[in-house]
Image: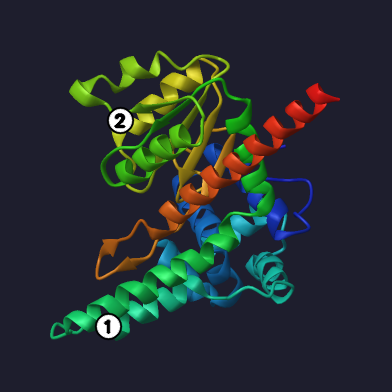
Amino acid sequence: MMLDEVASAPASAEELRAEIVARYESLSKRLKQIARYILDEPNDIALETLAVIAERCGVQPSAIVRFAKSFGFEGASQMQRLFRDGLLSNNAALGYSERVRQLDEATSADDAEPADLLSEFVEGNSLAIQNLLQTVSGSDMRTAVDLIMAADTVHIAGFRRSFPVASYLAYSLLQAGKRAVFIDGVGGLGLQQAHAVGADDLLIAVSFHPYSEETVALVNAVRSNGSPILAISDSLVSPVAKPAEHVLQVREAEVRKFRSLSASMCLAQALVINFAFEATRTDGSVRDGGQG
């Protein structure tokens, strides 16, 4: 069977996403553009026309048809129906990306007052935080917490825009009683610091488009050592997500070309507090067992 063929079409949007991630590296450049858009903007795939999707992907509509057929569908509309069915069975808010685009178009006036700007950023970040429940499920959080619990030491890395999220994770995990090391890359020693990540440790790598070279190099170095990686990124097929055992996907708001970190910080806080609750329960069970 050729790389661009499958025996049968996926039966759900979740199955299609898993298949796309598994086959991503084998796709052509054009099909990768479509694959990433499908992973990052599933609501658009469900609701928009083929022409609009093609324009936003930067490809011809025929390329989307070819993409759909390569995953076993008869055409693009059959593929879109999977995502549309998922939306109809989901009570969460729809059209996140479109609402953000509409917000940007409605608030791009040059004469905006300070209060207007505040309102724009509040609304944009509110949309991003609401959307976090779409991209990170309860099982995703459970897996991430289990990885942290199982690690002897958690190493955290994030550079440039991701630096505040990574530093907060390191600080908070230490406060919660977890052995944690912040890979800050001071003096250009990021890769050398990565050598300290052992087989029983965990690397949490935080990176968003355009993905810092330092974080990508760290992830590849740790992966070659066989250590587990938890990625926090904006795409399931980003260069830090692909090598990871598990990915928490975050799509931040972008207002007037400024990208926020509100959703990422919200996720980081929830992750640490979930860990703290789990650690407390585990410690309590051990003490109770000893007293018995």
Question: Residue flagged by tag 2: what amino acid is it?
Answer: Glu
Q: Quadrant of residue 185?
A: top left
Q: Which residue shows up at 13% across the image and 86% down it?
A: 111
In this rendering, position of residue 3 left or right of residue 273: right
Q: Quadrant of residue 278?
A: top right
> Which residue is disc 1 drawn over?
107
Residue 23 in view: no
> In the orientation shown, which residue stands out farthest toward the front?
291
**Between 166 and 233, which is closer to the camera in this rendering?**
166
> Which residue is disc 2 drawn over?
214
**In this view, 285 is above or below 95:** above
In this rendering, position of residue 55 left or right of residue 84: left
In space, the residues marked 2 and 1 are separated at their CA atoms by 35 Å
Question: Residue flagged by tag 1: what amino acid is it?
Answer: Thr
**Between 178 and 105, which is closer to the camera in this rendering?**
178
Q: Which residue shows up at 69% across the image and 59% down it?
A: 13
**Between 113 and 279, which is closer to the camera in this rendering?**
279
In this rendering, position of residue 72 left or right of residue 246: right
Give x and y (percent) for residue 180.
Answer: 45, 27
- Numbered disc 1: secondary structure: loop
Give x and y (percent) for residue 156.
Answer: 41, 31
Q: Which residue shows up at 54% across the image and 76% down it?
A: 48
